Image (cartoon, rainbow, N blue to C red):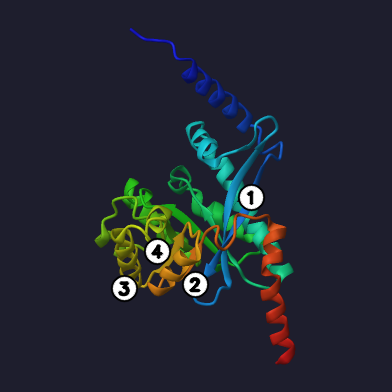
Amino acid sequence: MRRFARAQEQRATRQFELESALRHALDARELFLMYQPRVSLQTGVIMQSEALLRWRHPVHGLVSPAEFIPIAEEASLIDTIGAWAMSTACRETGQLQRLARTLPKVAVNVSPQQFVNPRFTAQVEAALERAALAPDQLEIEITESMLLADAGRTVQTLRALRALGIEVAVDDFGTGYSNLGWLASLPLNRLKIDRSFVTKMATDPRSDALVGAIIQMAHALELKVTAEGIETAEQAQRLRELGCDEAQGFWFSRPVSLQALRTLLAPVSRLLADGTRAA
């Protein structure tokens, strides 16, 4: 026996509606990028920004990425949307570098479907060329689970990206089940500690110890470490004490528009310009 559930029908109706609308969102210019700065814990300087995909639906307003990205993946739209996000992030970062006269790198999240696409590396290279952006100014973020999905193709793609000079980071590190021996052999540049560990550091000694252990392990493997979800000065200070390289979170900045990011970079630009004049 099956019972009708009104809530389930409403969820299915909304998902179908969003999928239909998402097919036209690019042409309608409803998708856009926001940027969240990543800050050096030692100097406070913005080192990089993470490009975050957003969707402003004409009826529902802002739709959460946690809702529409899985829909895009199920509907086989993520390759097209992901390629647009990569191209746009490269183009806007190139523009920002020329206007702000600084070199903040950009990080772009990549879905598993994108990463296993045989054309992925070529698409990234083409996006960099169109934007006149140096490959070392781009970082690709992949999840821990993607490292285990297709080992052969994963290693091949990682090596191709690194050969171009593109950096690769493992996002949400600590939430999956990576083989540490295999992790040590991969051509990676950075681990990003998941926010779930950072938020519990002050109240859970085990989370604090785990974060410290990840930082030590990453540095032993010559990897940089970024902590996500920093919301208090105490968290930032503790991560600084543990030797974490960079941090990202609301304590430093919420995701902002490209113009707002340029404003945040203005003090750094003036400092560089003053240094040039003094020289």
Between the residue at mark 2 and the residue at mark 4, the CA separation in whole angstroms equals: 21 Å
Going by the numbered disc 3, the residue's amino acid type is Ala
Q: Earlier in the sequence, mark 3 or mark 1?
A: 1
Between the residue at mark 3 and the residue at mark 4, the CA separation in whole angstroms equals: 13 Å
Front disc: 3 or 4? 3
Between the residue at mark 3 and the residue at mark 1, the CA separation in whole angstroms equals: 35 Å
Q: Residue furthest front?
A: 203
In the rendered image, the vertical position of residue 161 relative to residue 245, given as above or below: above
Quarter of image, res 45: bottom right
Question: Which residue has dot 3 on it?
Answer: 220
Q: Earlier in the sequence, mark 1 or mark 4?
A: 1
User: Few, some or many C-alpha atoms within 10 Å of disc 1 (few <14, some 14-19, many ≥20)?
Assistant: some
Q: Secondary structure at mark 2?
A: loop
Question: Which residue has dot 4 on it?
Answer: 188
Residue 130 in sight here:
no
- Towards the viewer: 201 or 242: 201
